[in-house]
Image (tube, rainbow, N blue to C red):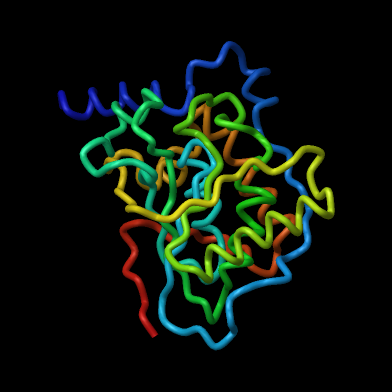
């Protein structure tokens, strides 16, 4: 019981739960932006499950969004950008570890492409124009970042940012960092599938559930009502 209480105390302080009012929470929810798909994308011939790592504020909401994307097989919440020995919530929360709260998305490229994942990431999962913050959450650990695992992902991400900035898709310039993936470290168990397990949690209600609605509205073709979960078995074709 003691461990459970400790974890819930940590969760209670996670992702800026201490907001000054319900009204402040409502205002913190990101406004979706309808954007065009990337001109440069993965080759259609790509087969086998692939992984993508994104950071866009509190990982609860970002994980929750991608768990509702068709073609996604699993999404882990975790940490990227720092060293393995500092990939712990208490340390990452200081903003001094180099880590960002991130998600690792395992997906089937025959059903959804890396470029489509980026479109969801920029459009509804977070606001890519906010520097070192996301809504009510502030600090480098909440920065917007794409962690690429190969040259193809790097090229697609950089080209898409340039495409969106050139088209002035957002009222401000995109500040998303595009960095090489040094490692992804899974977050503590109590953070995994947090949105699914806690749909009435105040932070989730006011900051993250609107993102799921936005995904359904803007991307009906790739939206799936039943989310994948960390505990689900991954089907390999």
User: Residue at (54%, 51%) from the top-left corner?
Assistant: 178
Hey, which residue is sitting farthest left in the picture? 2
Image quarter where the C terminus lies is: bottom left
Q: Please give the name of the residue rendered at 31% of the width and 58% of the height, measured from the top-left corner.
A: 231
Which residue in the rendered view is the most extreme toward the top? Answer: 20
Q: Quadrant of the N terminus?
A: top left
The residue under the point 53% across, 26% down is 137
In this orientation, which residue lies closer to the viewer: 176 or 111? 176
Judge from the rendering whether residue 100 lies leftward or rightward of residue 8; answer left or right.
Answer: right
Q: Position of residue 169 (x, y in %)?
A: 81, 50
**Residue 172 rendering spot, x and y as whole percentages:** 77, 38
Is 26 placed left or right of 153 in the picture?
right
Q: Position of residue 28 (x, y in %)?
A: 65, 27
Which residue sits furthest bottom? Answer: 45
Give the percent coordinates (x, y) of residue 84.
24, 44
Depth check: 120 or 194 in front?
A: 120
């Amino acid at each position: 019981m003691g461990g459970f209480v400790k974890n819930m105390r940590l969760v209670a302080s996670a992702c800026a739960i201490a907001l000054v009012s319900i009204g402040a929470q409502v205002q913190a929810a990101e406004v979706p932006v309808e954007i065009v798909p990337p001109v440069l994308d993965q080759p259609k011939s790509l087969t086998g499950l692939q992984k993508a790592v994104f950071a866009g504020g509190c990982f609860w909401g970002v994980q929750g969004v991608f768990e509702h994307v068709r073609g996604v097989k699993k999404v882990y919440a975790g940490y990227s950008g720092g060293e393995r020995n500092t990939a712990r919530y208490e340390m990452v929360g200081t903003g001094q570890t180099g880590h960002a709260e991130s998600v690792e998305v395992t997906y089937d490229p025959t059903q959804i492409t890396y470029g489509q994942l980026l479109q969801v990431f920029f459009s509804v999962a977070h606001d890519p124009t906010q520097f070192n913050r996301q809504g009510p959450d502030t600090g480098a650990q909440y920065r917007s970042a794409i962690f690429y695992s190969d040259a193809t992902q790097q090229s697609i991400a950089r080209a898409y940012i340039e495409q969106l900035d050139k088209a002035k898709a957002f009222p401000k310039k995109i500040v998303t960092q595009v960095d090489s993936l040094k490692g992804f470290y899974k977050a503590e168990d109590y953070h995994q599938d947090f949105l699914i397990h806690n749909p009435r949690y105040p932070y989730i209600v006011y900051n993250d559930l609107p993102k799921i609605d936005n995904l359904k509205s803007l991307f009906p073709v790739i939206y799936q009502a039943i989310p994948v979960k960390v505990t689900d078995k991954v089907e390999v074709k």
